[in-house]
């Protein structure tokens, strides 16, 4: 009996494409335009606030539209700055969509898995931004489906997000399915709750969480094919 191809859901940001690079590049430009020096401390604090706001979205506390503005509002409030958060946020999204940089080993992983696994992108990012980055990187030919939460109508880690993805995949078999990503709160928790095998991509070797335990943890994308038996 032929071995079934695994179904592999790959997160996009900081799993395939280097979102941290894109974020710093776009932020530096919008801050400079606003008369702010893009210091390492300012960029780092924005990054922390941004993660917090997206986690509130994952928990259903904030909407996507609110996240895009509140992350800048919180930062400017902390710094005592009177700046137009909504306008700066819109400019940031436009710059974020420009260009791309791969995570080390991501291109090689996709080439290795192409034809041997059913590949899907599973992203919580904004559709317009992700569409542009996917196009810039030439990613579409590698994937049988691209599931962006803004279009799906639900966000990772919600079971409904995964249910809607599964519903449009021919002959989908959850027993042969994986969720691979860098986020414990969206990728691993979401994949676990949806009944998938989970693989935490953790190149920075961040501390684990006792309440969200992946099936596997890797520090280099080159480790992934062996886990899949490929």
Image (tube, rainbow, N blue to C red):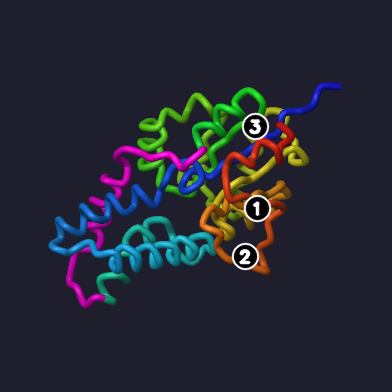
Q: Residues within 10 Å of mark 2 (few under 14, many from 20)?
A: few
Q: Is residue 12 above or below residue 112?
A: below
- Depth-wise, is mark 3 or mark 1 nearer the camera? 1
Q: Residues within 10 Å of mark 1 (few under 14, many from 20)?
A: many
Seen from the viewer's position, the closer of residues 110 and 31 is 110
Label 3 sits on a secondary structure element that is loop
Residue depicted at x 55% and y 31%: 110
Q: Given contact means CB atoms under 8 Å apart, are the residues at marks 1 and 2 in contact?
A: yes
Q: Position of residue 44 (x, y in %)?
A: 35, 65
On whether residue 104 falls in the magenta region, the answer is yes
Seen from the viewer's position, the closer of residues 66 and 43 is 43
Q: Which residue is denoted by mark 3 in the rendering?
A: 169
Q: Is residue 154 above or below residue 226?
A: below
Residue 38: image quadrant is: bottom left
Residue 157: image quadrant is: bottom right
Quadrant location, the N terminus: top right
Q: Position of residue 62 (x, y in %)?
A: 45, 64
Q: Which residue is denoted by mark 1 in the rendering?
A: 217
Q: Which residues are magenta?
A: 79-105
Q: Which residue is denoted by mark 2 in the rendering?
A: 208
Any mark on residue 32, and which? none
In the picture, measured across the screen, residue 210 lies left or right of residue 31, that is right
| CA separation in Å, label 2 and label 3 | 32 Å
Label 1 sits on a secondary structure element that is strand
Furthest residue in direction right, as rendered: 1
Q: Earlier in the sequence, mark 3 or mark 1?
A: 3
On whether residue 93 falls in the magenta region, the answer is yes
Quadrant location, the C terminus: top right
| CA separation in Å, label 1 and label 2 | 10 Å
| CA separation in Å, label 3 and label 1 | 26 Å
In the picture, measured across the screen, residue 124 lies left or right of residue 3, that is left
């Amino acid at each position: 009996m032929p071995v079934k191809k695994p179904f592999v859901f790959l997160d996009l940001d900081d799993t395939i494409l280097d979102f941290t690079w894109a974020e710093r590049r776009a932020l530096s430009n919008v801050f400079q335009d606003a008369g702010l020096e893009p210091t390492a401390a300012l960029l780092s604090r924005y990054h922390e606030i941004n993660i917090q706001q997206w986690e509130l979205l994952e928990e259903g506390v904030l909407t996507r539209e609110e996240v895009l503005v509140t992350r800048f509002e919180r930062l400017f409030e902390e710094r005592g700055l009177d700046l137009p958060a909504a306008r700066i946020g819109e400019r940031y999204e436009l710059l974020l969509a420009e260009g791309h940089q791969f995570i080390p080993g991501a291109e090689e992983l996709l080439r290795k898995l192409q034809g041997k696994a059913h590949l899907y992108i599973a992203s919580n990012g904004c559709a317009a931004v992700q569409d542009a980055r996917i196009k810039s990187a030439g990613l579409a030919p590698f994937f049988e489906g691209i599931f962006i939460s803004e279009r799906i109508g639900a966000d990772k880690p919600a079971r409904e997000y995964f249910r809607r993805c599964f519903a449009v995949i021919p002959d989908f078999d959850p027993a042969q399915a994986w969720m691979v990503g860098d986020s414990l709160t969206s990728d691993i928790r979401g994949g676990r709750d949806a009944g998938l095998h989970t693989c935490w991509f953790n190149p920075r070797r961040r501390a684990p969480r006792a309440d969200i335990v992946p099936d596997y943890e890797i520090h280099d994308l080159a480790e992934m094919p062996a886990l899949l038996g490929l």
